Image (cartoon, rainbow, N blue to C red):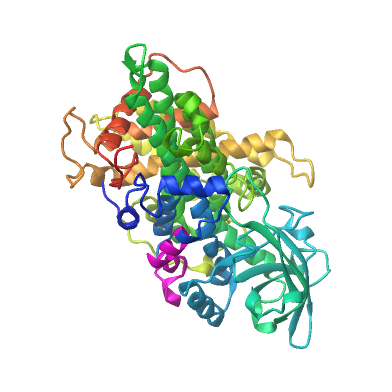
Amino acid sequence: MTHAAYLTAAAMDRRLGDPEDAGRLFSYARCAALDEREEFPLEICRELDLLGLPAHYVPAAYGGTLDSYEQVLQLMRAVARRDLTVAIAHGKTFLGAVSVWVGGSREQAVELAGAVLDGAVVSWGLTEREHGSDLLAGEVRAARTADGYLVNGEKWLINNANRGRLICLLARTADEGGARDFSLLMIDKQRLSPPAHRPLPAVRLHGIRGADISGAAFTDAEVPAAALVGAEGSGTETVLKSLQLTRILCASLSLGAADNALDLAAGFALERESYGRRLVELPQTRRMLGESYADMLLAEAVTLVSGRSIHALTGELAVVSAVTKYFVPTLVDEVITRLGTVLGARSLLADGTHRHGRFQKVQRDHRIVGIFDGNTLVNLHALINQFPLLARQLKRRTVDAAGLAGATDLAAPLPGFDRDRLSLLPRTGSSLLQALADGVEELTALTADGTVPASLVRRAQAVRAAVDGLAVELAAHRPTPVEVPAAAFALAERYAAGYAASAAIHLWLRNRAAAREPGPEAGPRADGLRADGLWADGLWLEAALARVLDRLAPGRPDPQDDVLDRLVPFLTEQLRAGTLPSLLHYPLVKGAA
């Protein structure tokens, strides 16, 4: 099954060339060398500029090509698959600019769009050394003057703080003791005198060693009134709404990292012999590969649906973004750790000893994704704060039917993104989770004609049973201002797992017919497999639900359960066919290792 967003990303991949070719600018070998030297990937970022990637950060309304966030997701996944450092370094410009797309005036947006399209790097100055994720404790101050603002203070651990020409700065403009104390300023550092702005040194990192993670200090920096983004006092609200977009886009970084790790581990298992057999033929290895592939497909399903929800379920993004940012990076961290076991000692090798040390690099690099734009606890806490509202809507089974269809049907045209529909409170909860029971009932009806096996329906019903009591438990939670009980975090994790299961179910239901239609990728294989076989009888969905159930009710693997074993041949076939191990068709540009 083909999809336009995947084809766009594959086209850029082809223009970048084979990453296995050390002679290419954006190759695994070059990225490994830059990482070893802790050097910023400047030339690679310039190549991405020449290929037009910055235009995908700019909404079409302002002269860019951004009209579908699912397209940006797949483009960034393609870059992250080659190197997370490059994806994080280049993609930060979108994060720096997004507050203007969300809260700025049209005049500001047009001006910023021109700068980004001309190659300007934009950073996002939110965090401070002493306060971390606690944005409301920020001390950087912007005092109003006759002509604008006088800015003083330091922002720290800011991506591209040194290399960025522009910085979108969250600063204190009042002292009333609340969220309205903060405003956003888009500051052009080129217009500041040297004493007014001082770059802070880049910090050394365990992962993404070549990235510019540094800071900026301001001393009586005179900033014009036109730099104010939105109304004074709206900074916190704009940041929180912007994070609803960026947290979902962070899933692309995790998917790219998982693509890389799975390629390395599965490729090794196909080539390596142990005890007279290929590693992939050994039961324990097959189990780990099956679990990892199923987790990957589940993460991909969540990302696809959440990315489309930016357009189709915009008012629910407060919950969608928190779930996605918690669930996908957490799941991928587990996948990478498991695949390291498949590789054994080779997972630790650096330099050119084994595949340019790619595995240990991706393992190091990905750990930071869970920290970006609110760490795991921050996102789970965001869900916990919404428990009363989520409980009510889950009990009512409220569903935005049109929005749900748009989010899950890959053939459905997406509405344009409407920033005015962003809300800090998801008043309708999560249509996706609230439609879980409907999806299970629809699956159950498909057993009558043998469309899906009874085992798939049993798993779907088990997920539903595990989630059924959530509404009551969420409603019973009593908010606490400081010490949140561990049980509340466990509830939030269950909520996220239920969302993931429903995303997978509805994605399969809405696209199963199209996935079975003959296409350029759907011919018979030498071993009798078909590329559409993942979809035909719900195999990938059953495997994904098995993985969700393992999170909801962890237990020892059942030796009689072969769903993960049945999944592995499709993984190996996609690798041998030169396509991305994925739910959808994506031809890779890849030579021999």
Residue at 29 percent of width and 42 percent of height: 591
Q: Quadrant of residue 291?
A: top left
Locate the C terminus and report the quarter of the image it occupies.
Answer: top left
Residue at 51 percent of width and 31 percent of height: 349
| In the image, residue 542 above or below residue 499 | above
Spot occupied by residue 244 in the image (x, y as percentages of width and height): 56, 57
Q: Nearer the viewer, residue 129 or 530?
A: 129
Q: What kind of secondary structure does the magenta stretch mostly adopt?
A: helix
Residue 188 in view here: no
Q: Quadrant of residue 283?
A: top left
61 vs 373, left or right, is: left
| In the image, residue 133 above or below residue 366 | below
Judge whether residue 47 is colored magenta.
yes
Q: Nearer the viewer, residue 168 or 240?
A: 168
User: Which residue ends up furthest to the bottom in the rendered image?
Assistant: 146
| In the image, residue 238 above or below residue 400 | below
Q: Nearer the viewer, residue 499 or 467?
A: 499
Spot occupied by residue 529 in the image (x, y as percentages of width and height): 21, 31
Residue at 39 percent of width and 65 percent of height: 415
The span shown in magenta is 44-66
Q: Quadrant of residue 294?
A: top left
Spot occupied by residue 374 in the image (x, y as percentages of width and height): 64, 50
Spot occupied by residue 284 in the image (x, y as percentages of width and height): 42, 17
